[in-house]
Image (spheres, rainbow, N blue to C red):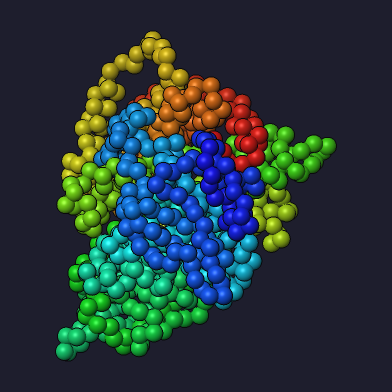
Amino acid sequence: MTEAVGSVEGQVRGDRQPVEETDDWIQDAGNRGDQKTPPELGKLSLLLLSHDTASGEESCARRSFDGGCVAVGDGNGVVFFLLEGLSMSTVVAAPVASIVAAPGGSFLLEDRAPAEVFTPEDLSAEQRQIAQTAARFAKEKIDPAMKQIEAKEPGVMRGLLTEAAELGFTAVDVPEEYGGLGLDKTTSALVADFISVNASFSTAFGAHVGIGTLPIVWYGTEAQKQRYLPKLASMEMVGAYALSEATSGSDAMNIRTRAVLSADGAEYVLNGEKMWISNAGFADLFTVFAKIDGEKFSAFLVERGTAGFSIGKEEHKLGIRGSSTCALVFSDCRIPVENLLGEAGKGHHIAFNILNIGRFKLGAACLGGARQALELGIRYAQERTAFGKKIAEFGLIQRKIALSATELYVTESMAYRTAGMMDAALAGLPAEMAHAPREIQKRIEEYAVECSILKVFGSEMLDLVADELVQTMGGYGYVEDYPAERLYRDARINRIFEGTNEINRLIITGWLMKRAATGQLPLMAAIKRLMEEILEPPPFDPEESADAFAREAGILASLRKVFLLAAGTAYQRYLQALQDEQEVMADLADCIMAIFGLESALVRARKLLLAGAASSSAKVAAAMTSAYAARALAVVERAAKRVLAAASEGDALGVQMAVLRRFARVAPTNEIALQRQIARHFLEQGRYRI
């Protein structure tokens, strides 16, 4: 036991709490009153700064990252990170040594051992502490301001972002040499996850720390980085990203905003309009995309207040009403040539690479929203009485809880697996390249398909959980007096953000097919082996396995075979024209997502089983994995049937359907029993806690 800080308010009163060793605290973070503080963190501590509001003096007022304060007070005292003579890069431990930086998309063809895949159970003590700090900030700062956020009260959103910056949250992805923390992608995902209790706030936060800041981190000149990154890390400046236009949303390359170099070569003159720009109402720095001379797709840094640059009125939106969304207008807006970001004509590299990390973080943020919605549903079901008993006892309510928790578990497993692969890839960089932005981009781009999967799966998972919450609450879920209707409205935007889900489905399949065509992913060889297997007679007496997850592993193997059958048939029919068959591409993407989801859930369940076979965590993970396996099988079988029917006909189609039935022939499991088991676990916990 060691003494440590409790809640922010408690420390202002002088209260202290003992720290208990616990493995499950992170699931509790921000969700209950008897807050536990994580294990002792060695050199990293959470301390309290006293602040004299009269004199303005603080016990530690410097902002240095080679020892001392990472963040300072809020006027009364604030939790902050203190490093005793250490570089901030030492705060978060290196990736677990056994985690493999598997090639992007390789989950389609290869199995991974539990030790090779990062799961939330592998989080370091430091990472858990940061996650709990984010959750506590959300609970104590964001939650109480919900009404003011929704009403767009002036200064509220920016004030909350500034408070988040004081805790270091806006500096996580900024390199140390430019005033940031330079932490790993897992920690970045944790912050996005646990701070996301209000979609309007998480939209503003995500737009700033992700697409608003990373273009300069990755593509900025040294002068641009020195000028802007310290201010973005500290929230002295708020960032925004301006790509979309009225006639070019998903078709980003079709933008009409033009940039022309002045006669003296000293300035670019911008003309055009941008639409639906997050943070526009209060942002200070905009990454704006335009075509030089109407041809060269490029990016520019434009500061608020620049002559010829104006900002439109706030949009009135279905959801995320508390976030700022405005149009931008450029009318002979003159900016220095030094504000060209990256190379002229190479702006598409910036746009699309930044969107990869944006999709990854959006998937992580959806976890926080879904966790909150599920807890609200559980709480209501335990309190509401109908027909003489709590509605939590009804099977159909339990089905809603089980389905929501299972989809959340699968998304969570995929998100932290992807973060772990990114971190393992980055850890493998030679020392001289460890801080090279282009090398970092390459490692992250390797997981473009996983990022798109997270965006699609996560946003649709959150939609499902929010919808089930409204249905569970009935009339109460439909009125503004209760949070369910806001969560339902807010969830809808995520299927549009960062490239629509339809576009991302095309990216998922197209990206993998491109890698297959170039030999980077041995997909064609796998299809050929499958065709040879089809010609062989099926085994009549399959060997029995002692594997506790033999059934789920068998379903995973079948899903891969069904996907290869459908993909091979489609490719043979359409060849390079496959990219024009959007319905086929989308169905193949659904197969790909189901495979990644099931393998991620399965590996995590195996890891929990190895850690403690009799634990409630291992048991509920096993049940959710089994339940998802049944759901994934149904999704893949249905999608494959559509693909085969579109790409084949006659006798060939009859043969392929027979093969599909052979691969998908799995004895049904008792899903009702599984759902009841899953629901009982989370009803006992009162929240999503594995």
Tell me residue 639's x, y (percent): 42, 39
- Residue 282 vs residue 329, the one in the foreground: 282
On the rendered structure, is 678 left or right of 455?
right
On the rendered structure, is 598 left or right of 160?
left
Query: Is 474 located above or below residue 111 in the figure?
Result: below
Residue at image position (66%, 34%) is: 684
Tell me residue 216's x, y (percent): 29, 66
Residue at image position (40%, 25%) is: 553
Quadrant where the C terminus sits is: top right
Residue at image position (69%, 44%) is: 379
Residue at image position (46%, 44%) is: 128
- Residue 422 vs residue 660, the one in the foreground: 422
- Residue 304 vs residue 2, the one in the foreground: 2
On the rendered structure, is 516 left or right of 382?
left
Tell me residue 59's x, y (percent): 47, 64
Residue farthest to the top? 541
